[in-house]
């Protein structure tokens, strides 16, 4: 007869209850507010949305500038405001999912309105493993990396070049006007 020790640990295999999503990744949906979104995907989605918004704005601005009428200007303003609605809705959805990745409620995304506070969503890492908002986001694909670094880098580069070129152009215009005034005397 085998004697069993009443103080030994149970031998049953029990899965970790807290980590129900062990090894699984979340499905990525573009227009969803539930789930999680990592930092790089957050930058990529934001950069692509901004690029689409700017391309559409330029596409509507060029014909309106050719007509130069008050009706065309009003129509352009209306179309740009109309295009802002899906852009802001998409940006809010992405910000909510990024908040979920950090383990925060979606309501915390309202803090991103405060200047410089929004940088938290870029620099703070998401919670490791599953959290109350679901499984972790999948690893970043090459397309996500290209969109995040490529588009975001180009936007930053254009901003730096504009910051250098615009003041130089303004000085050039001022010198040209001064030279024209001297010649006309």
Image (spheres, rainbow, N blue to C red):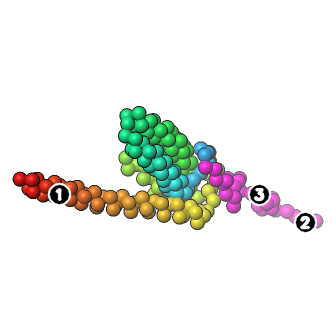
Q: Name the residue under label 3.
A: 14
Residue 95, horizontal then vertical, whole percent: 52, 47
**Could you tell me which residue is drawn at 29 percent across and 60 percent down?**
165
Residue 69, horizontal then vertical, whole percent: 38, 36
Q: Are marks 2 and 3 in contact (CB under 8 Å)?
A: no
Q: Mark 1 points at which residue?
A: 176
SS for callout 1: helix
Which residue is farthest front?
184
Check the image and report above or below for 139 versus 51.
below
Give whichever of discs 1 and 2 has the lower sequence position: 2
**Could you tell me which residue is drawn at 37 percent across and 34 percent down?**
70
Q: Is residue 103 visible?
A: no
Point out the stretch of residues depicted in magenta. 1-30
40 horizontally vs 26: left or right: left
Q: How crowded is mark 1: few (under 14 residues within 10 Å), some or many (20 or more)?
A: few
Give whichever of discs 1 and 3 has the lower sequence position: 3
Residue 3 highlighted magenta (yes or no) = yes
Residue 26, horizontal then vertical, whole percent: 66, 54
- Please tell me whether mark 2 or mark 3 is closer to you in this view: 3
Front-lying residue, 185 or 138: 185
**Could you tell me which residue is drawn at 51 percent across and 51 percent down?**
52
127 horizontally vs 58: left or right: right
Q: What main secondary structure does the magenta stretch of the protein show?
A: loop
Q: Do the residues labelled 1 and 3 touch (CB within 8 Å)?
A: no
SS for callout 3: loop
Q: Residue 24 carries which label?
A: none
Q: How crowded is mark 2: few (under 14 residues within 10 Å), some or many (20 or more)?
A: few
Quadrant housing the N terminus:
bottom right
Which residue is farthest right?
1
Q: Mark 2 points at which residue?
A: 2
Which residue is farthest left?
185
């Amino acid at each position: 007869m085998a004697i069993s020790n009443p103080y030994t640990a149970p031998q049953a295999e029990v899965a970790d209850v807290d980590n129900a999503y062990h090894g699984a990744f979340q499905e990525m949906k573009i227009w969803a507010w539930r789930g999680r979104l990592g930092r790089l995907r957050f930058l990529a989605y934001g950069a692509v949305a901004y690029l689409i918004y700017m391309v559409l704005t330029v596409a509507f601005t060029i014909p309106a500038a050719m007509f130069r009428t008050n009706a065309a200007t009003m129509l352009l303003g209306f179309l740009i405001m109309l295009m802002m609605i899906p852009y802001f809705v998409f940006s809010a959805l992405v910000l909510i999912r990024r908040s979920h990745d950090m383990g925060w409620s979606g309501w915390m995304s309202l803090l991103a309105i405060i200047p410089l506070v929004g940088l938290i969503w870029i620099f703070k890492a998401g919670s490791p493993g599953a959290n109350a908002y679901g499984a972790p986001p999948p690893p970043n694909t090459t397309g996500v990396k290209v969109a995040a670094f490529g588009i975001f880098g180009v936007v930053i580069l254009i901003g730096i070049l504009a910051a250098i070129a615009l003041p130089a152009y303004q000085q050039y215009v001022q010198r040209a006007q001064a030279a024209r005034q001297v010649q006309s005397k």
